[in-house]
Amino acid sequence: METQNFEEKLLKMTKPEVNQLKHQDMLADAITNAKDKSVVSWWWLSIPLFIIAMLTMKSVYMPHTTLISNIKELKSQQPVTSVIFFLIVPFCLIIFNAFSILKIWSLTGDHKDSNSVRAIWVNGLMIFFSIIILIFYAL
Amino acid sequence: MKLNWFKRAGIFFLPTSIAGWLILVAGIAFAVYSFIDIDSRSHSVSDTLINFVFMLLIIGAVYSLIAYFTSRKSK
């Protein structure tokens, strides 16, 4: 009788089920970290973008000046500030955001959901804006 | 050492501890001080606003950087 009960119990037993994989935790952490990084990137990118917007307005309202001439003037008058905001900050942000994208890309593999795609897209946008700022500085 | 001074809400970091609130209040106080300082030296309203927005962005960037390193990483 006992043997029969034990056999029934064995038949009912299944493999231990893991609802959430460790890999999913790592992916969730990577996406959260990428979102946090994109927020910080956005704040730091807003400074050179604001300067470019102000220089564009200056070139529109002041005769005989262009955006390129205004950027050159900024570079000569504020060499340290321009190097920090137009060279060091975008360069660092490109590296940090690229690492975030690589991490999410490697963790998701072929199964990219909407959250990971969105995080990759936002980080890519930050890299795009950083490249734009570097181009403006190189002009 | 894991610090839980801030939590992210959209593009802002909200304080969740006394240290976080102190940093936020210090940032706001510095912004007010810089507005008064810029306003006393500027020649027009647009001059004040352009310089103040620039200073505000710098304060926001530094605040977000501090908050990023001291925020709780939610799972």
Image: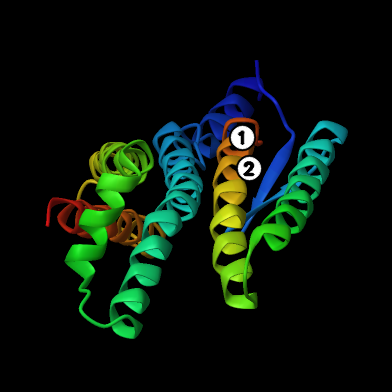
Please determine whether, in this image, residue A53 is positioned above or below residue A48: below
Q: How many marks?
A: 2
| Residue nearest the viewer, comparing A69 with A130 | A69
Please determine whether, in this image, residue A39 is positioned above or below residue A37: below
Give the residue at x 37% y 71%. A53
Q: CA distance from mark 1 to mark 2?
A: 5 Å
The chain to which mark 2 is attached is B
Tell me if I can see residue A111 in this picture.
no
Q: Identity of the amino acid at label 2?
A: Tyr
- Horizontal placement of A13 versus A64: left or right? right
- Horizontal placement of B24 versus A1: left or right? right
Tell me if I can see residue B50 in this picture.
yes
Quadrant occupied by the C terminus of chain A: bottom left
> Residue A118 in the image: x percent, y percent?
37, 62
| Element type at mark 1 | helix
> Residue B11 in the image: x percent, y percent?
57, 59
> Residue A103 in the image: x percent, y percent?
29, 38
Give the residue at x 20% y 73%. A66
Q: Are tags 1 and 2 found on a single chain?
A: yes
- Horizontal placement of A120 versus A45: left or right? left
In which image quadrant can residue A135 be found?
A: bottom left
Crowd around label 2: few <14 · some 14–19 · many ≥20 (10 Å): many
Please determine whether, in this image, residue B5 is positioned above or below residue A126: above
Pointer 1 residue: B66
Residue A10 disc label: none
Pointer 2 residue: B63
| Element type at mark 2 | helix
The chain to which mark 1 is attached is B
Q: Identity of the amino acid at label 1?
A: Ile
The extreme top residue here reads B1
Quadrant occupied by the N terminus of chain A: top right
